[in-house]
Amino acid sequence: MAADSGGTSATRPARVGWIVDVQADFMDPAGRLYVRDLFDDSDPGAVRIVPALEEVAAWMRKRCDVLVYTGDWHGLEDAEIDPVDPDPGQGTYPPHCMGRSPDPEERAGAEIIAGIRPVDPVVLAHDAGVEEAAAAARRAVAGQRPVFVQKTRFNVFEGNPGADALVRSLGELLGRRPEFVVIGVARDVCVTQAVDGLLERGCEVTAVRDATWGLGLEPEEVTLARWAEGGRVVTVAELVGN
């Protein structure tokens, strides 16, 4: 993975590609929590953006200094998981993205979908601390390897105790204030929590509007307008054309 053009390394910001939760249970129509508009039965869902995700991921591999993937990585003991009586209004959901399950079929739902899946990632475990996060950032930058951040909650900054340290460490190691380019699902849950969280931490953020898909919990234009207040919102064509 190597960044190119778009300015010299001394004049442009470092770039971090940030790919949110493009896992089988969210992206596959047969997945356990397939991302589609919950209030529109005609909505085809997240499968519609797979080509856009693949195009942006390919751009990131060429143009970003580091790629970070996030993914739910659940066990039955996690607070968000309730296999008996899940209630999204109370923040509980049926088992999904069960990366810590002993059942290989359950674990398969946590896999990043083909075409976007990272090769030889540095894994930041769901229970990582500050030192592990700093070490993961060093390995990723030195080896030009992607990072996969496991998380136990939808919000990466709540679901992995090393997430803050990873963001800080990447900025320090890259030597320039990084621009985070964000894609993935679901736009009105995990993606907006990532974008809002990065903005709250003073990061430069570019969100790619047509490389996200939502659940209909918040109107798309409301989400995009909030992102644009603190960051930048672009289309795939605008991003890859630069």
Image (cartoon, rainbow, N blue to C red):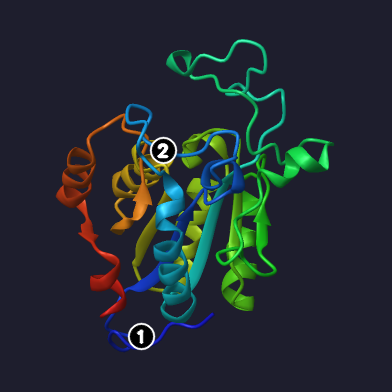
Name the spot of residue 179 as percent of width and height, x first.
Answer: 33, 65
Residue 187 found in image quarter:
top left
Residue type, numbered disc 2: Arg
Q: Quadrant of the N terminus?
A: bottom right
Name the spot of residue 81 as percent of width and height, x first.
Answer: 62, 23
Indicate the secondary structure of the residue bearing disc 1: loop
Residue type, numbered disc 1: Ser
Indicate the secondary structure of the residue bearing disc 2: loop
From the image, tell me which residue sits under label 2. Answer: 36
In this view, the residue farthest toward the front is 42
From the image, tell me which residue sits under label 1. Answer: 9
Q: Quadrant of the C terminus?
A: bottom left
* Residue placed most toward the observer, 204 or 49: 49
Identity of the residue drawn at 34% across and 37% down: 188
**Residue 142 seen from this side:** yes
Name the spot of residue 49 as percent of width and height, x first.
Answer: 40, 56
* Residue placed most toward the observer, 99 or 25: 25
Residue 152 found in image quarter:
top right
Identity of the residue drawn at 57% across and 24% down: 80
Give whichever of discs 2 and 1 has the lower sequence position: 1
Identity of the residue drawn at 40% across and 44% down: 44
Query: Which numbered marker is on residue 190?
Result: none
- 209 relative position to 71: left or right: left
**Residue 150 seen from this side:** no
* Residue placed most toward the observer, 60 or 125: 60
Name the spot of residue 82 as percent of width and height, x first.
Answer: 63, 17
